[in-house]
Amino acid sequence: MQNKTKVTLIIFTWNEIDGMKVIMPQIKKEWYDQLIIVDGGSTDGTIEYAQANGYDIFVQKERGAGAAFLESFEKAEGDIIVIFSPDGNSVPEKIPELVAKIKQGYDIAIASRYLNGARSYDDDMVTAFGNKLFTGLMNILFKAGITDTLVMFRAYRRESLKRLSIKTKAVAWGTQIMARAARMKMKIGEIPGDEPARIGGVRKMNPIKNGIVELSMIITEFFRPVTDIDVGVITNHRHCQTKREYEILQK
Ligand SMILES: Nc1nc2c(ncn2[C@@H]2O[C@H](COP(=O)(O)OP(=O)(O)OP(=O)(O)O)[C@@H](O)[C@H]2O)c(=O)[nH]1
Ligand SMILES: [Mg+2]
């Protein structure tokens, strides 16, 4: 049997019926091997729409975007995992581009809204400033070398993601991933990806509340002592067996 790289597409929904109707038909079946929709408890027909169209949807047991990630990650069988939002903010055609980036050897591929002329049509002054601030912090504190730390539209090599031992149920789950991946010197790549405006529904994200959670996640991860998460098999397929080796890698 051929060893084909499998792709799991994970879609986050929470009352996104308007976006779903427009975006889901644009997602081509040949782009993925497994599609999982994780729902936050929609009451607007999102669940019924998904079921009527044969999509595999489940309602998360615990609250929080981080819980949505953890519960869907548990079900993911693919070698490559793509996280997608069907609210209009993620461009479906970028899915195969992100997958291709992982196949090139990256552990994480980001659809950056600020790379090479890409832009967000959903940003306001507060979110534009927040993105700059948090990306700057990630680059200074973790040497992440990226242009967009907050976008959820990313692809991951599953084995690399597993090594990060993500446990948080909070909204800043993506930041915990970036901080740990950068600290481990994982190979993080980006492609430019415009963020079109949201289609219908309401924004779930509260910029101020989220900002506080994101900031505390960055600080917590920065001061987290070196543990077994950081040592062990380090990315780029390099091995790092001791804390000392890990510290050398950080320099
Ligand atoms: N399953 C699940 N999905 C969620 C949750 N919170 C948000 N989502 C979905 O995740 C995607 C991204 O949501 P957010 O990152 O919170 O941002 P947003 O509400 O889209 O806000 P804007 O993009 O700024 O308009 C959307 O498809 C949401 O419906 C949650 O707790 N559980
Ligand atoms: Mg959105």
Image (cartoon, rainbow, N blue to C red):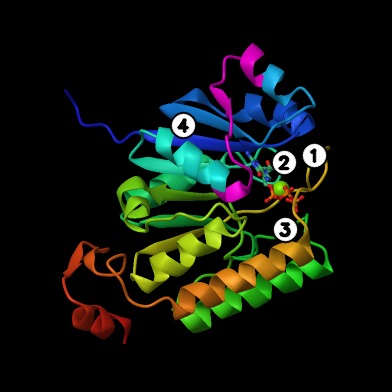
Of callouts 1 and 4, the N-terminal one: 4
Amino acid at the residue labelled 2: Gly
Foreground residue among 159 and 194: 159
Residue 94 at least partly seen: no
Lateral position of residue 229 relative to residue 34, left or right: left
| Residue annotated with mark 4 | 31
Residue 212 at least partly seen: yes
Alpha carbon distance from label 1 to label 2: 5 Å
Q: Secondary structure at mark 1?
A: loop
Alpha carbon distance from label 3 to label 4: 24 Å
Which residue is painted at 38% across and 73% down in the image?
A: 183
Which residue is painted at 80% across and 39% down in the image?
A: 199
Of callouts 3 and 4, the N-terminal one: 4
Residues at marks 1 and 4 touching, judged by CB atoms closer than 8 Å: no
Q: Nearer the viewer, mark 1 or mark 4?
A: 1
Mark 3: few, some, or many residues within 10 Å (few <14, many ≥20)? some
Amino acid at the residue labelled 4: Trp
Rendered image: mark on residue 199: 1
Rendered image: mark on residue 120: 3
Q: Which residues are magenta?
A: 50-66
Which residue is painted at 53% across and 27% down in the image?
A: 28
Membership of 126 in magenta stretch: no
Asked if ligand 2 lies within 8 A of label 2, the reply is yes
Residues at marks 3 and 1 touching, judged by CB atoms closer than 8 Å: no
| Residue annotated with mark 2 | 88
Of callouts 2 and 4, the N-terminal one: 4
Q: Which image quarter: residue 107?
A: bottom left
